[in-house]
Image (cartoon, rainbow, N blue to C red):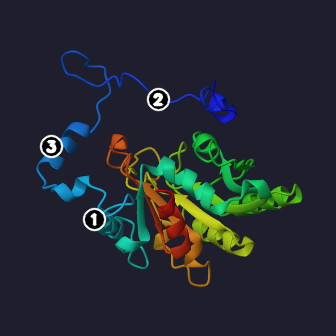
């Protein structure tokens, strides 16, 4: 016999099985990924025994967090430099989605997280399964989801939830977006940050596709702007702005299960680290 919640979980689909890997002879139509090149790169760099223990806890060694801070400072162009203590690692961004729901919401108080539609489908699982949180989805209608005009739709969604007794505690966005592949321009991000400040809620930006933006010939190319590249002064308390990032997309290394939370909120960081 299973518990009631486990019986529900058993009916939720998940990826498991043959990865259909590319082979030039035996499977030329298979999927080619960057893992082999990464394996060569990793094997050419020194990993000492300290990388395999629990000595520094389970939220990322100083070496790992320092390396990630260097990467973020080089490519995300933060207005204020990111240091290693702002970074907390977990077993992938999926785990961090769940943690953010646990940290921001009390489901028994009808607290929720707001997301725009369409959006990454697995949020409906990641944010829900073990947290009891019910996401609040906002439909922007004919409005361009990436234009500053979308802010009014989110505000309307916030107020509609409030009228039903649902308390929104955070807004999650995907930037670059999954599945639409577009990036939020700076003006829209500022508008969303101002909205979150006015409502007293967190903004959590899933930026796992940050560097997977490419030149386009058929239309203007997308330009990634991190929320950390925007000066929060006069817009929002920086402690209410959080970024999620990981190795699965830009580095083609989902199997490493390495994701990180980047935050300037000490209490948020402590809560996240206590989960692991």
Q: In this view, does 190 lie above or below 180?
A: below
> In the rendering, at what x and y percent does residue 120 appear?
57, 43
The residue pinned by badge 1 equals 67
Please tell me which residue lies in front, 22 or 123: 123
Please tell me which residue lies in front, 2 or 110: 2
| Residue 261 horizontal side relative to residue 235, left or right | left
Please tell me which residue lies in front, 193 or 112: 112
Specify whether residue 87 is in view: yes
Q: Which residue is drawn at 80% across and 59% down?
A: 156
Of the image marks 2 and 3, the number of the one nearer the N terminus: 2
The residue pinned by badge 2 equals 15
The residue pinned by badge 3 equals 40
Location of residue 30 (image quadrant): top left
Of the image marks 1 and 2, the number of the one nearer the N terminus: 2
Q: What element carries label 2?
A: loop
Disc number lying in front (2 or 3): 2
Mark pair 1, 3: CA separation: 19 Å
Mark pair 1, 2: CA separation: 30 Å
Q: Which residue lies furthest to the top in this view?
A: 26
Local crowd size for mark 2, using a 10 Å CA cut-off: few (<14), some (14–19), many (≥20): few
Local crowd size for mark 1, using a 10 Å CA cut-off: few (<14), some (14–19), many (≥20): few
Q: Which residue is drawn at 26% across and 65% down?
A: 63
Please tell me which residue lies in front, 38 or 188: 38
Are the residues flagged by discs 2 and 3 in contact, CB closer than 8 Å? no
| Residue 197 horizontal side relative to residue 83, left or right | right
Q: Residue furthest front?
A: 1
Q: What element carries label 3?
A: helix
Q: Residue at x 47, y 51 (%)?
A: 93
Local crowd size for mark 3, using a 10 Å CA cut-off: few (<14), some (14–19), many (≥20): few
């Amino acid at each position: 016999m299973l518990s009631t919640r486990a019986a529900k979980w058993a009916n939720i689909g998940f990826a498991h099985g043959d990865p259909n890997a590319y082979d030039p002879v035996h499977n030329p139509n298979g999927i080619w990924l960057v893992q082999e090149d990464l394996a060569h790169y990793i094997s050419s760099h020194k990993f000492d025994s300290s990388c395999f223990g629990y000595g520094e806890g389970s939220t990322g060694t100083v070496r790992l967090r320092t390396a990630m801070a260097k990467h973020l400072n080089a490519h995300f162009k933060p207005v204020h430099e990111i240091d290693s203590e702002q970074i907390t690692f977990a077993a992938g961004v999926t785990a961090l989605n769940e943690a953010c729901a646990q940290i921001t919401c009390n489901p028994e108080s009808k607290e929720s997280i707001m997301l725009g539609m369409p959006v990454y489908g697995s949020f409906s699982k990641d944010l829900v399964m073990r947290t009891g949180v019910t996401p609040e989805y906002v439909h922007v209608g004919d409005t361009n989801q990436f234009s500053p005009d979308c802010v009014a739709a989110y505000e309307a969604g916030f107020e509609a939830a409030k009228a039903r007794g649902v308390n929104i505690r955070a807004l999650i966005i995907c930037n670059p977006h999954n599945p639409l592949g577009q990036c939020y321009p700076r003006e829209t991000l500022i508008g969303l940050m101002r909205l979150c400040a006015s409502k007293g809620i967190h903004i959590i930006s899933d930026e796992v596709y940050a560097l997977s933006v490419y030149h386009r010939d058929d239309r203007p190319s997308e330009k990634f702007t991190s929320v950390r590249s925007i000066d929060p002064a006069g817009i929002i308390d920086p402690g209410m702005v959080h970024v999620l990032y990981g190795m699965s997309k830009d580095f083609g290394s989902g199997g490493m299960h390495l994701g990180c939370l980047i935050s300037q909120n000490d209490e948020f960081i402590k809560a996240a680290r206590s989960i692991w």
